[in-house]
Image (cartoon, rainbow, N blue to C red):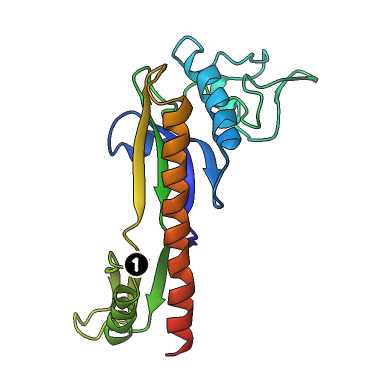
């Protein structure tokens, strides 16, 4: 598995609460301030809806658990489609969805570096790949998984290639947006610079792999 790096706008119930996360915007290329503000409109609409999951109309023959979340489709009620609460590509979610942000959830602007998980044939190959990554700026690379009965002669070893570039900026708690205007523009500028620097390491890694 892999990711080329991204900037994202994400809600979580608290620091480190990944299981309750909901992403309002994900960009693999540097987003503009307009992109982020559009995602913030979705967030405001949702978090301001009585500070609870949206009350989605339900047909008589449907239960809340049968209402399916989709980014580009409407919720059907009988034969007529019901428009989602949000207006920029995010449809309504399940009423009982445990991942919906709580009333005091935190909203973050994040820049995350590229990450790769590579299955290697044996421990020696995995250690070689990890060392190559570390030597070319992927400082957080590590051995993540092993398969094989012999602790030394492993059949398969998974290497995680990860560089250090990352930004986490808290923007809001609950419905109160703390970072806006020029400060938000500045944080986005730093986030985009972080993403660009991290993605430059992809070129260095590619060249190093070609020389093996």
Tell me if residue 18 comes above or below residue 162 in the rendering. above
| Residue 209 can be seen, yes or no | yes
Looking at the image, residue 202 sits to the left or right of residue 15; the answer is: right
Assign the C terminus to one quadrant of the image. bottom left
| Residue 114 can be seen, yes or no | no
Q: Position of residue 97 (x, y in %)?
A: 47, 27
How many callouts does the rendering have?
A: 1
Displayed quadrant of residue 161: bottom left
Tell me if residue 5 comes above or below residue 146 in the rendering. above
**Residue pushed farthest left?**
151
**Residue pushed farthest bottom?**
212
Q: Position of residue 2 (x, y in %)?
A: 47, 62
Kindly identify which residue carries mark 1. Answer: 160
At 41% from the left and 72% from the top, the residue drawn is 118
Secondary element at image label 1:
strand
**Residue pushed farthest top?**
50
Q: Position of residue 39 (x, y in %)?
A: 56, 31
Tell me if residue 78 comes above or below residue 161 in the rendering. above
Bin the neighbour count of mark 1 within 10 Å (Cα to Cα): few under 14, some 14-19, many 20 and up.
many
At 68% from the left and 15% from the top, the residue drawn is 59
At 21% from the left and 82% from the top, the residue drawn is 150
Q: Position of residue 16 (x, y in %)?
A: 28, 39
Looking at the image, residue 89 sits to the left or right of residue 209; the answer is: right
At 48% from the left and 57% from the top, the residue drawn is 196
**Residue pushed farthest right?**
79
């Amino acid at each position: 598995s892999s990711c080329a790096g991204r900037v994202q706008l994400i809600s979580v119930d608290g620091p480190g609460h990944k299981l309750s996360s909901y992403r309002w915007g994900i960009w693999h290329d540097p987003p503009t301030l307009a992109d982020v503000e559009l995602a913030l409109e979705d967030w405001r609409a949702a978090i301001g809806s009585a500070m609870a999951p949206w009350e989605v109309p339900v047909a008589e023959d449907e239960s809340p658990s049968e209402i399916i979340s989709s980014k580009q489709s409407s919720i059907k009620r009988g034969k007529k489609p019901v428009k989602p609460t949000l207006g920029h590509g995010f449809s309504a979610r399940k009423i009982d969805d445990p991942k919906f942000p709580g009333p005091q959830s935190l909203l973050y602007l994040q820049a995350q570096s590229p990450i790769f998980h590579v299955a290697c044939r044996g421990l020696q190959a995995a250690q070689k790949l990890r060392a190559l990554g570390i030597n070319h700026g992927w400082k957080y690379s590590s051995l993540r998984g092993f398969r094989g009965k012999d602790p030394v002669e492993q059949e398969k070893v998974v290497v995680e290639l990860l560089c250090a570039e990352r930004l986490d900026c808290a923007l809001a708690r609950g419905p109160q947006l703390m970072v806006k205007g020029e400060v938000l523009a500045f944080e986005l500028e730093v986030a985009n610079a972080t993403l660009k620097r991290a993605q430059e390491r992809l070129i260095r890694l590619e060249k190093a792999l070609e020389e093996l």
